Amino acid sequence: MPVSIAAIGAQRPAVLEALEREFDVHKIWQAPDRLAALAPIADQVRGAVSHGMAGLPTEVIQALPNLEICSIFGVGLETTDLTLARERGITVTIAPVLYDDVADLAVVLGMSACRRIVEADTYVRSGKWASGRMDYGRKFSRQRAGIVGLGRIGTAVAERLQGFGMELQYYDPMPKPSVPYKAFDSLVGLADASDILFLTAAGAHGAGPIITAEVIDALGPKGVFVNVSRGWLVDEPALVSALKDGRLAAAGLDVFADEPNVPAELLEMPNVVLSPHIASNTAETMAEMGSCVVENIRSWFAGNGAIHPVT
């Protein structure tokens, strides 16, 4: 009999088709109660596939006594219980091919917020240009850029910003002695010294925001905030309030605290650029990520081990 695979998080059709040619795939994410859907097949399941937002949470690991591997579509591990996975000897793999796309979008959001690109597009389409020029934007090049989290994505953002002549600085709880950028020992200090603050950090769901009202106020009324990380890492009401009151100049946001729900006030703000969690959403990267998911599962059950393991 083919190996049973539980699809904990939704997968692209091409991924499912590839897996179903070799495995018995159970589309658990479609069930209103994942644990109830797992119960009848729990003993059979040896592999799982998921994505960064669904992850491999504690309760799913506990429900699957014979789970050997979980292949995740993405790189986010905030909703995966890595400690329990390690204790159980479960291998967790990622699809580490999205860093360029995420970094690209961070720069695009930052530039769009500064140069008011979305407003400008609307200005032209509405016919307002005939009545005169729109108001000034602000310079993007040669600003002070603060990066929160200097991992693979943060480093890729920094590399791109160098081309814009920016003064680069960062905050990361893990020391990065080999990088040439100025390090700060607090987020408030970094925000106070930045014109544009890029959030590229990882952070556990439920641990509380790291971009607090204090950080936002330190960035100040001329500051721009960009988030391509996770919405739950930001005090979203504080962000909305600061943008509404003019205590923050602008923002470029790809992620939100309660996706796909976006605070109604943000939808009405012309100084905010919004995108629907699409940082890695290019045809090329989606296909490559899907291949990572399939190949990790295929390699494992062929006896060759995982290709992109994190545990």
Image (tube, rainbow, N blue to C red):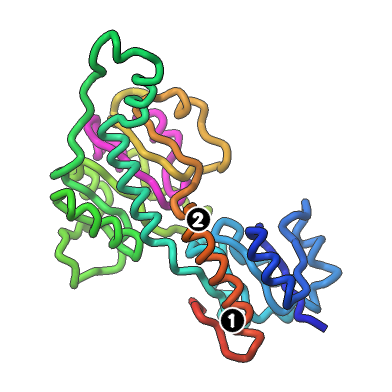
Which circle marks residue 283 in the picture? 2
Residue visible at 39% across and 61% down? Answer: 99
| Residue closest to the far bottom | 303
Q: Which mark is residue 87?
A: 1
Amino acid residing under circle 2: Ala
Name the image quarter holding residue 4: bottom right
- For discs 2 and 1, the disc positioned in front in the rendered view: 2
Indicate the position of residue 232 as horizontal and vertical percent values. 48, 48
For the point 40% across and 20% down, which residue is it? 125
| SS type, badge 1 | helix
Q: Which residues are magenta?
A: 215-243
Percent x, y of residue 178: 18, 72
Residue 62, given in percent of the width and then of the height, sits at 70, 72
Alpha carbon distance from label 2 to label 1: 36 Å
Residue 57 seen from this side: no
- Residue at position x 81%, y 62% from top? 37
Q: Is residue 110 found inside the magenta-colored segment of the image?
A: no
